[in-house]
Image: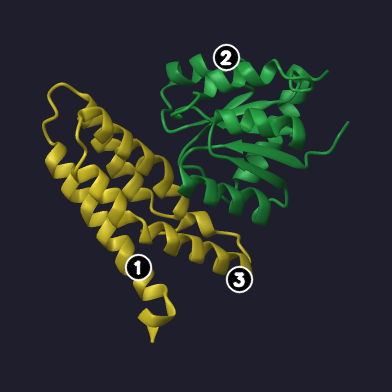
Amino acid sequence: MASSVTEGLSASTLAQFKVLQQRFVAGLPARWREIEAAPTPQSLQTALHRLAGSAGSYGFERMSQCAREAESLAASAANGGLAQVLISLQDQIGKAQSMVAADSPAGSA
Amino acid sequence: MNELRRVLCVEDDPDIRMIIEFSLATVGGYEVCLCPGGHSALAQAPIFRPDIVLLDVMMPDLSGPETLAALRQQPGMKGVPVVFMTAKAMPDEVEELLQYGATGVIVKPFDPVTLPQDIRIYWEHGRGIFGD
């Protein structure tokens, strides 16, 4: 889960980015609940679409790719493979949470 | 010619608004006005007088194309470049967005480090297309 988006940033700007990254990751459980509990196929697609469009900008490119793949499968009539991709997406969310926890002062103490 | 200073950003997702502000204000040094939807963009545009508009396509109140059409009716907004942001990047979808009169399309997720330069390129390009 390389954060290529941070290349070229100064130390102080990188520190600001990491704060925003932590806020984004803190919101991932709510996003995941929205995906899990989506009442309609359209709301599922919308939740996945939003995650696909945001995660990569915070350095989580693989999460964006999983969400985009799941969005595409959810939009198809025969959405075979969607469950497996959602498992991969959940795994990426877990990795992001672990990464941020390890980066935070409490995690590195 | 004016300098590129003020960027009006219209985006309903708060996480994307947050990273746009970081990218364009902190990294790029631009003055940024963030709007959560098309209606607030239409209210802010005459006050903020943007040099360029960054506009999400899928929004719950007014869509990006609807917002663009309404912005073009406002005094002083006819020549302002507008760049769509979308997570849908198929060539036919991009072409359709350009036909609404946008200067360009930025695909989400975007790189927050390079976005300020991308905006500048579109601004320079857009002046050539829409310059009053």
Q: Name the side, left or right, on which B124 lies relative to A86.
A: right
Disc 1: which residue? A99
- Rendered location of residue A9, percent (x, y): 60, 62
- Secondary structure of the residue carrying tag 2 is loop
Q: Name the side, left or right, on which A63 lies relative to B54.
A: left
Q: Residue at x 74, y 18 (%)?
A: B78
- Rendered location of residue B47, percent (x, y): 76, 35
Q: Could you confirm whether marks 1 and 3 are on the same chain? A: yes
Of residues A4 and B8, the one drawn nearer to the viewer in this rendering? B8
Q: Residue at x 53, y 51 (%)?
A: B18
- Secondary structure of the residue carrying tag 1 is helix
Is mark 1 in CB contact (under 8 Å) with mark 3? no
User: Quick one: which chain is yellow?
Assistant: A
- Dot 3: chain letter: A
- Dot 1: chain letter: A
Residue type indicated by callout 1: Met
Q: Would you say residue B104 is visible in this rendering? A: yes
Disc 2: which residue? B100
**Considering the image in quadrants, where does the N terminus of chain A appear?**
bottom left
Q: Could you confirm whether marks 1 and 2 are on the same chain? A: no
> Image quarter for residue A49?
top left
Residue type indicated by callout 2: Tyr
Check the rendered structure and report the hue given to chain B. green
Disc 3: which residue? A11
- Rendered location of residue A35, percent (x, y): 24, 43
Q: Could you confirm whether marks 3 and 2 are on the same chain? A: no
- Dot 2: chain letter: B
Q: Is residue B121 above or below residue A25?
A: above
Q: Earlier in the sequence, mark 1 or mark 3?
A: 3
